[in-house]
Image (spheres, rainbow, N blue to C red):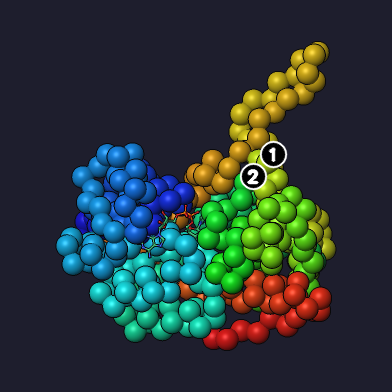
């Protein structure tokens, strides 16, 4: 096989970003099909992408109509488990957007299906492919900071996620949809598993959403203890309006390290009238463009060169476990142990 033929399922915000990468930026990938259960959304994506791509309203229909090797799943989280199971049953390799799933039962189903089909499975924690996150991890592994004491991860989104994510029972809320990345970063950078969690949350900006979905919170602070003793804090807000704010600070026994800043790569301008003005990252597609491309490329290369995919379904599961525990903590007001189910 010289090129990996790919079907992208879900042509919303994340799906079109990946589809564009496969179509225009990754020569070893061939985007052959797009699937979206909403025909108007599918046609919009097909018009925009302008490739030799066929469109379908279900994965089942695509599987029966066109040949491909891999599926990228970027649909609402509650649909991930069934879609992964269906793709795996046909021996298609799978890239699945985070969060892995909503419930632990769905996670088990995904891991079981991936194992029994013997397919490659990669989860969309793209920060692991961001050059700054990678450099930080390398330096930590080299011992530059000594023992890791505290990792603070700020994850604030400019706008609300789509409405399907507002119902906590269908999505696990913004700790899952926005901050899965922060939890994964803390776990990856500390090199340790979650032990316990305490979380506070509140609704400060979106009373209208809360009227419709009474459990909806738009801000949270989560404190974590890792098994190796390190501590973590996730600072979650959405919608902050001012930009996509993804910053991490790591405190170690020998020093401190910061990853990321709100200011983008553009110029800073200082004038007498306005003082110092810099432009900021407005959204995640812009802040992590390089990382999305690198993770998509790694998925394709991994299939062609038979590498173990990373991050994998277990990395996805660990983030679901901690999010569920944090939501239990918000609900009960108590510290929760984070138990690993597999
Ligand atoms: N890695 C990241 O930074 C990142 C960023 C955004 C979204 N995501 C994840 O990507 C997934 C999608 O999020 P989004 O913001 O793109 O959502 P979205 O609502 O913009 O798009 C989802 C699309 O999937 C379609 N869909 C839903 N169920 C389907 C099914 N069974 N078959 C075919 N199509 C179906 C919907 O019609 C919709 O067009 C979520 O899991 C989300 O958490 C990840």
Category of crowding for the residue at label 2, using alpha-carbon neighbours closer than 10 angstroms: few (below 14), some (14–19), many (at least 20): some
Q: In this rendering, does residue 67 appear at all?
A: yes
The residue at label 2 has a CB less than 8 Å from ligand 1: no
Per the rendering, the mark at residue 330 is none
- Comparing 70 with 305, the one in front is 70
The residue sitting at 73% across, 25% down in the picture is 277
Spatial CA span between label 2 and label 1: 6 Å
Quick one: label 2 or label 1, which is nearer the N terminus?
A: 2
Question: Is there CB contact under 8 Å for labels 2 and 1?
Answer: yes
Find residue 88 and report its horizontal and vertical position in percent.
Answer: 32, 75
Name the residue that disc number 1 marks.
Answer: 242
The residue sitting at 71% across, 21% down in the picture is 269
Find residue 288 and report its horizontal and vertical position in percent.
Answer: 54, 46
The residue sitting at 21% across, 45% down in the picture is 52
Residue at the top extreme?
Answer: 272
Q: Is residue 313 above or below residue 134?
A: below
Q: Is residue 51 above or below residue 166?
A: above
Name the residue that disc number 2 marks.
Answer: 158
Question: Regarding mark 2 in the picture, which secondary structure is present there?
Answer: loop
Question: Regarding mark 1 in the picture, which secondary structure is present there?
Answer: loop
Q: Is residue 55 left or right of residue 36?
A: left
Q: Looking at the image, how many numbered discs can be counted on the residues? A: 2
Find residue 62 and report its horizontal and vertical position in percent.
Answer: 23, 62
């Amino acid at each position: 096989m010289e090129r990996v033929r790919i079907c992208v399922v879900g042509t919303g915000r994340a799906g079109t970003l990946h589809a564009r990468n496969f179509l225009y930026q990754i020569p070893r990938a061939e985007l052959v099909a797009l699937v979206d259960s909403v025909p108007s959304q599918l046609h919009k994506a097909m018009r925009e992408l302008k490739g030799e791509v066929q469109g379908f309203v279900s994965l089942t229909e695509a599987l029966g109509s066109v040949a491909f090797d891999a599926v990228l799943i970027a649909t609402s989280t509650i649909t991930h488990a069934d879609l992964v199971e269906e793709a795996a049953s046909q021996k298609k390799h799978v890239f699945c957007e985070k969060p892995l799933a909503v419930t632990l039962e769905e996670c088990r189903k995904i891991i079981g299906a991936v194992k029994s089909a013997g397919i490659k499975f990669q989860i969309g924690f793209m920060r692991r492919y961001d050059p700054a996150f990678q450099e930080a991890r390398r330096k930590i592994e080299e011992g530059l900071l000594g023992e890791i004491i505290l990792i603070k991860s700020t994850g604030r989104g400019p706008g609300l996620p789509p409405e399907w994510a507002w119902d906590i029972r269908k999505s696990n809320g913004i700790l899952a949809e926005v901050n899965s990345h922060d939890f994964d970063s803390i776990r990856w950078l500390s090199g340790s598993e979650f032990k316990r969690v305490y979380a506070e949350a509140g609704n400060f900006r979106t009373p209208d959403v809360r009227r419709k979905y009474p459990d909806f919170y738009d801000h949270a602070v989560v404190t974590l203890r890792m098994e190796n003793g390190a501590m973590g804090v996730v600072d979650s807000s959405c919608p902050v309006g001012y930009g996509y704010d993804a910053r991490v600070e790591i405190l170690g026994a020998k020093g401190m390290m910061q990853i990321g800043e709100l200011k983008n790569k553009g110029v800073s301008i200082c004038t007498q009238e306005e003082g110092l003005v810099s432009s900021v990252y407005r959204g995640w597609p812009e802040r992590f463009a390089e990382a999305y491309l690198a993770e998509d490329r790694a998925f394709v290369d991994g299939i062609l060169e038979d590498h173990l995919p990373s991050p994998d379904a277990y990395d996805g599961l660990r983030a679901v476990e901690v999010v569920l525990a944090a939501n239990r903590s918000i609900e009960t007001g108590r510290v929760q142990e984070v138990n690993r189910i597999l």
